Amino acid sequence: MAQFETYRNAFPNARLTRKPNGVLEVALHIEGGKLVFNGHTHEQFVDLFHAIGEDRDNRVVILTGTGDAFMDAISPEGFDFFTPRGFEKILREGRKVLSNILDIEVPMITALNGPILLHSEYALLTDIILATPQTVFQDKPHFEFGIVPGDGVHSLWPEVIGSIRGRYFLLTRQVLDAETAKDWGVVNEIVPADGLLGRAHEIADGIASLPPLTSRYTRIALTQKLRRLVEESAGYGLALEGISAVEVARGLAS
């Protein structure tokens, strides 16, 4: 069992704060500003979610971003898409980060403080999603890099918004505004930016007041289908992503 003090400052791109009632706020960032996702954060977040899940004193987790976006920028730094060992690391981390989120056995709330243009699967594995009017959803970088969107979005988006809509969303790089996302069942509430975290904590405090095993086992019960979906689809999707990355690499080399 992890102890909060042993990991609260262990992750340079996640600011962790926890209230006495066990509500843990996780704010993703780069040096206090908006997160720019890269290979180092890809590796780091595997351990971040594992540590959170191992701490039985966490009662509810709020996942949010910093600045004007939840996650809208990516850098190739730290990634190796183009060698077998490099992509094997990406595949292993990509599978593990999803299973580690699902292994957080307490209710999770995502507070989207702005656009989420990549790794929206993180949010889709949580239980409640709050957004601001400025929030938009898109799967932007996969096709920009020329690779298959196989890191979980390929199965989770069709699951959440329906097969036809989900495939269209990914294939066309569709941008979903907050209202459309709410109408389609992706977002629970749209909250003004200055009230977003307050609303997230209000909901979290209510859940934290439940008996600990009630809230914990409710999260477990509600995510059984997602566990099966991720287990069946994540490894295969990431393998297909890796094959497409080889073709991109050969094109760059020619």
Image (cartoon, rainbow, N blue to C red):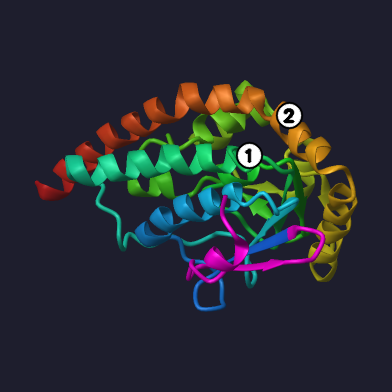
In which image quadrant can residue 116 be found? bottom right
Question: On the rendered structure, is 75 left or right of 17?
Answer: left
Q: Where is 68 relative to 191, above or below?
A: below
Q: Nearer the viewer, residue 116 or 239?
A: 239
The answer to whether residue 77 is above or below residue 110 is below
Q: Residue at x 24, y 52 (%)?
A: 80
For marks 1 and 2, give the one nearer the viewer. 2
Q: Secondary structure at mark 2?
A: helix
Q: Earlier in the sequence, mark 1 or mark 2?
A: 1
Distance from label 1 to label 2 (Cα)?
Answer: 10 Å
What amino acid does circle 1 point to? Leu
Disc 2 crowd rating (10 Å Cα; few below 14, some 14-19, many 20+) is: few
Q: Residue at x 29, y 45 (%)?
A: 89
Q: Along the line of sight, which residue is nearer the eye, 96 or 236?
A: 96
Label 2 is placed on what type of residue?
Answer: Leu
Residue designated by label 1: 125
Q: Position of residue 64 (x, y in %)?
A: 66, 60
User: What's drawn in magenta, residue-wise?
Assistant: 1-23
What is the x, y in percent for residue 229?
55, 23
Mark 1 and 2 residues: CB-CB less than 8 Å, in contact?
Answer: no
The crowding category of the residue bearing disc 1, from other C-alpha atoms within 10 Å (few below 14, some 14 to 19, many at least 20), is: many
When the figure is inspected, residue 48 is found, relative to residue 221, above or below; the finding is below
Assess whether residue 148 is covered by the magenta stretch: no
In the picture of the structure, the residue carrying the numbered disc 2 is: 222
Q: Is residue 254 visible?
A: yes
